[in-house]
Amino acid sequence: MNIEDFMLGYKAAWEQRNPAMFAALFLPDGQYHNTPFQVQCGTEQLAKYWERVKLQEDVQVTFEVLASTATSGIAHWHVTYQVASEELFQIWAKSTGTGLVARKPGDPLPRMVLDGVLQASFSGNLCSEARIWWHSMPQPA
């Protein structure tokens, strides 16, 4: 596996909102650092973490490979999605440190924009470790 193949799988797993597809990109003991201070290790934790994408709709992922070697790579990725539940919106609002977007009861949930960088290492045809650095915000009207 190389960074291009990994990112194609990452894109497909996110757009299809498929935790098993995401976990299958990794070695059985693979690691995914979704922030610098949190890591999911192994197939079960990876799939459980990726369950949150089921709270997203109309997911669109693009990426650009920035660097590639035989065993590692770096890509810039960009995602937009429609928040599909109040639960996901609350998770986002608490994790970003920016507080809640001004919404009145009954207002529609926002469409979100995420932008980030992913660095990955590979062993054979699977990812051994991936790290992402990212930021999110509501899509401007």
Image: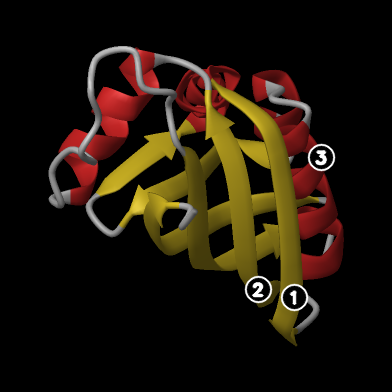
- For the residue marked with disc 3, what is the amino acid? Ala
* First in residue order: circle 3 vs circle 2: 3
Residue under pointer 3: 12
What count of labels does the image hold? 3
Kind of element beneath mark 1: strand
Residue at 72% x, 52% y is 61
Residue at 28% x, 59% y is 36
Query: Where does residue 8 sit, x and y in percent of width and height?
Result: 84, 53
Kind of element beneath mark 2: strand
Could you give the CA–CA distance between mark 3 and mark 1, rounded to whole angstroms? 15 Å
Query: Where does residue 130 sit, x and y in percent of width and height?
Result: 54, 56
- For the residue marked with disc 1, what is the amino acid? Glu
Residue under pointer 2: 75
Which residue is at the front of the view, 18 or 60? 60
Query: Where does residue 83 sit, x and y in percent of width and height?
Result: 49, 28
Among the 4 quarters of the image, the one containing residue 72: bottom right
Residue at 73% x, 67% y is 63
Residue 123 in view (yes/no) = no
Could you give the CA–CA distance between mark 3 and mark 2, rounded to whole angstroms? 15 Å
Among the 4 quarters of the image, the one containing residue 134: bottom left
Could you give the CA–CA distance between mark 1 and mark 2, rounded to whole angstroms? 6 Å
Residue under pointer 1: 64
Residue at 21% x, 41% y is 95
Which residue is at the front of the view, 101 or 24? 101
Q: Name the side, left or right, on which 83 lies relative to 122.
A: left
Q: Name the side, left or right, on which 96 lies relative to 46.
A: left
The correct choice, above or below, for 127 with respect to 44 in the image is below
Q: Residues within 10 Å of mark 3 (few under 14, many from 20)?
A: some
